Image: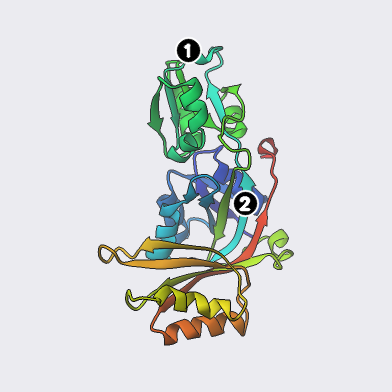
Amino acid sequence: MTNKVAFLGPAGTFTEIAARAFLPDAKRMPYKDIPSTLHALEKNQVDAAVVPLENTIEGSVNISLDYLIHKHDFPIIGEVAIPIAQHLLVHPAVNDLHDIDTVYSHPHAIAQCHEFITGELDEVEQKFATSTAQAAREVSENEHTNIAAIANELAAEKYGLKVIQENIHDFTNNHTRFVLVSPNDVAPSFLKANEQHSKTKVVVTLPSDFSGALHQVLSAFAWRKLNLTKIESRPTKTGLGNYFFIIDVEHAYDEVLLPGALEELKALGCETRVLGTYPSLFVQVKERSL
């Protein structure tokens, strides 16, 4: 049984909702940012950690990827995608949008609500927080009532704020993927029961930049009929223009196909690393169920 799971805090973040979806019986431990969340797992303060990895609108959460690749060696053991509903939260005394002069939230949340902000709050100042829930907490603790936060319904409930405008996100089909990382076998039973929906995340570093190099990498998966659902590049941080590739394979790590593909890549001179092989699910959750 997993006793403690770290998440990006404070209480009321979408990451806490994901942590609850992963491990409903675990004690949820909030941390101030993504590096601190993973550092807590490294220091054995918790048994597992949950971090966001990708959003429908804003794409990859690069700080999560970079820390999982460069700073830590924790395997990904599960992934859930949950719907993201952004609301505009204010002090209970505020009744009109025109009373607001500052909008406070995580940069991704503000970007996800660009059309609403430019259309309804074009003149307001935008300030960034480390999480949507942190923004809600700051608004609740601020003596000025003209500050609004973009966050979820759970944050409104936890910090005594009023939802003055619901569903202000630009796109209705907005989801975020969250991953559960742990050196221990703490994957919940509902994930293990859905292993047919598995993926394997692989990091590939090319031996050098030459014509056709990436084509050779992709061919190792293609002729084995391994479907790639995503491929992206990230800097190796060793020099300008040096990149590696992060590849999502729609297949669990088996005894034949994926090992064979990685051996072929090694024969080409590539460096490879498996970040995890894990079930990947879409989960519908109710914010108020926490």
Residue type for callout 2: Ala
Which quarter of the rendering shows the N terminus? bottom right
Indicate the position of residue 260 as horizontal and vertical percent values: 55, 85
Residue in the picture at 48% in, 26% down: 117
Residue in the picture at 61% in, 44% down: 17
User: In this figure, which residue is indicated by the disc labeled 1?
Assistant: 99
**Image height of 153 relative to 80, above or below:** above
Q: Residue furthest left?
A: 239
Label 2 residue SS:
strand
Indicate the position of residue 242 as horizontal and vertical percent values: 30, 67
Residue type for callout 1: Asp
**Image height of 113 relative to 223, above or below:** above
Examine the rendering and report whether any part of residue 43 can be seen. Answer: no
Indicate the position of residue 46 as horizontal and vertical percent values: 51, 56
Of 149 and 248, nearer the camera is 248
Of 191 and 126, nearer the camera is 126
Indicate the position of residue 152 as horizontal and vertical percent values: 58, 34
